[in-house]
């Protein structure tokens, strides 16, 4: 198997760059750059310096103008860096141009995140998902890896493209491309199997009618810690980015005794590569299909509002924007300033203040879950005369029909029914299942 990139294990010192174009983007660009620093450090690469550059316009070749790019390369050399990390996304051609100019490895935020995911992936499912995303990222960039073969083989003046004789590099690219396509297809097929297995598990949960919530939020917000606190389990919770790549479902009990299933999910980050969201679909589907969401935020982060927004955007992308949400302002033990607390109350009036660490606020959180479930769904059985097909349609539309069976002139329907329509069906109800 060929290696997509050998870079991250080889490079040691990085110059980080964020290019922005509009004055109004400055503060966001600054915080993105800071976060990139954390991401890069997570890979064990030392950050020599981080620079923010404003470019008056977007240049196609290198994003910024050539003069500015040359300055950046100079700075990287002065720091003896072996990699330049550009926080903006780079098109494959832009990445090639940068590497040509710098004669150094140049990567973007997406590649950094992909590498972190690759390092963290533990289970077969996570590995498959990361592999899929990495291959898709690598495919249009293969040319960049093998360009040196052409330079060596072509003797003099052998520029890229043109030329009647095909260089070694070009042939190697074709082989690699085929290999990459095969790997992508295999990963997709295997993930489809995983998706089916999850579907079967979900069906089983639905049959039992146990309510289910998914814990979502920015990376390092405390999602796994909350799950551990609530279920007494020991999912790895660590002060690092992307500690969790696999979903874990655990059971807890609400104060009124009813069970609740909780699923921990992979954390989000700003500019999360789209292909990672897609690749992690099998995992993230758990969130989309849960009865409600628990959105965990790090209340002690100065960036909390932006991080809140990022998670909402990803949830929207996944089609889960209509789900009911309990917002948890976690790590509240770290917020001691009364003014800051008051501001949080004002900005997030419905949020639960909690600390998964100390246990503070966990009771309030469980009560919020109970309240959400009070209006939820009950499993019911009905005997509906065939002439009231309208009610059967209603059930198909607004409830989750588990089974239907004909019995003489009646239809026997078993369904999970939201409180909103339960009243209209009451006269046809048999005993709750
Ligand atoms: N002070 C404090 N620290 C917390 C709290 N909750 C979590 N932490 C810490 O925050 C760090 C991240 O917690 P995790 O539970 O791993 O965060 P996560 O959201 O699961 O992160 P990813 O899996 O990376 O998405 C750990 O070091 C926790 O100990 C809290 O309420 N208060
Ligand atoms: Mg986690």
Image: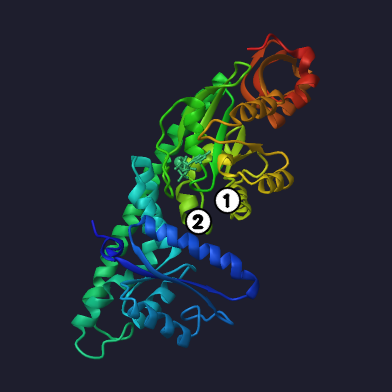
Q: Name the residue located 43 percent from the left edge and 48 percent from the top edge.
A: 242
Quadrant where the image shows the C terminus: top right
- Closer to the N terminus: mark 1 or mark 2? 2
Relative to 386, is 360 on the left or the right?
left
> How many callouts does the rendering have?
2
Q: Name the residue located 36 percent from the left edge and 63 percent from the top edge.
A: 138
Front residue of this view, candidates 193 and 66:
66
The yes-or-no answer for disc 1 within 8 Å of ligand 1 is: no
| Cβ atoms under marks 1 and 2 closer than 8 Å | yes
Residue that badge 2 annotates: 272
Q: Position of residue 289 (x, y in %)?
A: 57, 36
> Taking the image as drawn, is residue 325 in sight?
no
Q: Write down the quadrant of residue 398 in the picture.
A: top right
The colour mode here is rainbow
Q: Where is residue 416 in the image (x, y as percent from the top left)?
A: 65, 23
The yes-or-no answer for disc 2 within 8 Å of ligand 1 is: no
The correct choice, above or below, for 264 with respect to 418 in the image is below
Residue that badge 1 annotates: 314
Q: Write down the quadrant of residue 23 in the picture.
A: bottom right
Front residue of this view, candidates 410 and 16:
16
């Amino acid at each position: 198997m060929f290696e997509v990139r050998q870079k991250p294990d080889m490079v040691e010192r990085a110059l980080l760059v964020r290019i922005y174009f509009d004055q109004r983007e400055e503060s966001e660009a600054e915080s993105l750059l800071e976060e990139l620093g954390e991401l890069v450090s997570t890979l064990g690469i030392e950050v020599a310096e981080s620079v923010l550059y404003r470019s008056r316009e977007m240049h196609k070749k290198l994003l910024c103008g050539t003069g500015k790019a040359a300055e950046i390369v100079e700075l990287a050399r002065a720091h003896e860096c072996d990699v330049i990390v550009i926080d903006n996304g780079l098109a494959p051609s832009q990445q090639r141009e940068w590497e040509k100019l710098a004669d150094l490895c140049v990567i973007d935020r997406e590649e950094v995140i992909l590498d972190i995911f690759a390092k963290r992936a533990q289970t077969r499912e996570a590995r498959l998902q990361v592999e899929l995303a990495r291959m898709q990222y690598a495919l249009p960039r293969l040319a960049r890896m093998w360009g040196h073969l052409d330079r060596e083989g072509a003797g003099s003046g052998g520029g890229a493209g043109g030329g009647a004789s095909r260089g070694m590099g070009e042939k190697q690219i074709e082989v690699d491309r085929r290999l990459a396509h095969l790997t992508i297809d295999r990963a997709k097929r295997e993930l489809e199997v995983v998706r089916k297995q999850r579907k079967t598990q979900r069906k089983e949960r639905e049959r039992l009618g146990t309510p289910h919530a998914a814990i979502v939020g920015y990376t390092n917000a405390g999602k796994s810690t909350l799950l551990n606190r609530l279920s007494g389990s020991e999912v790895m919770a660590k002060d690092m980015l992307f500690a969790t790549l696999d979903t874990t479902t655990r059971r807890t009990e609400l104060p009124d005794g009813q069970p609740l299933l909780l699923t921990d999910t992979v954390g989000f980050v700003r500019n999360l590569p789209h292909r990672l969201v897609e690749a992690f679909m099998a995992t993230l589907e758990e969130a989309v299909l849960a009865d409600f969401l628990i959105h965990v935020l790090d209340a002690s982060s100065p960036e909390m509002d932006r991080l809140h927004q990022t998670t909402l955007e990803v949830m929207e992308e996944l089609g889960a924007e209509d789900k009911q949400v309990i917002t948890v302002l976690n790590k509240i033990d770290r917020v001691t300033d009364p003014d800051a607390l008051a501001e949080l109350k004002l900005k997030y009036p419905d949020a639960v203040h909690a600390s998964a660490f100390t246990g503070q606020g966990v009771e309030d959180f469980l009560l919020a879950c109970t309240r959400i479930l009070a209006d939820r769904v009950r499993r019911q059985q009905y005997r509906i005369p065939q002439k009231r097909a309208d009610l059967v349609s209603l059930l198909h539309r607004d409830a989750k029909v588990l089974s239907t069976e004909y019995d003489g002139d009646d239809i026997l329907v078993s369904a999970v029914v939201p409180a909103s329509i339960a009243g209209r069906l009451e006269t046809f109800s048999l005993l709750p299942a």
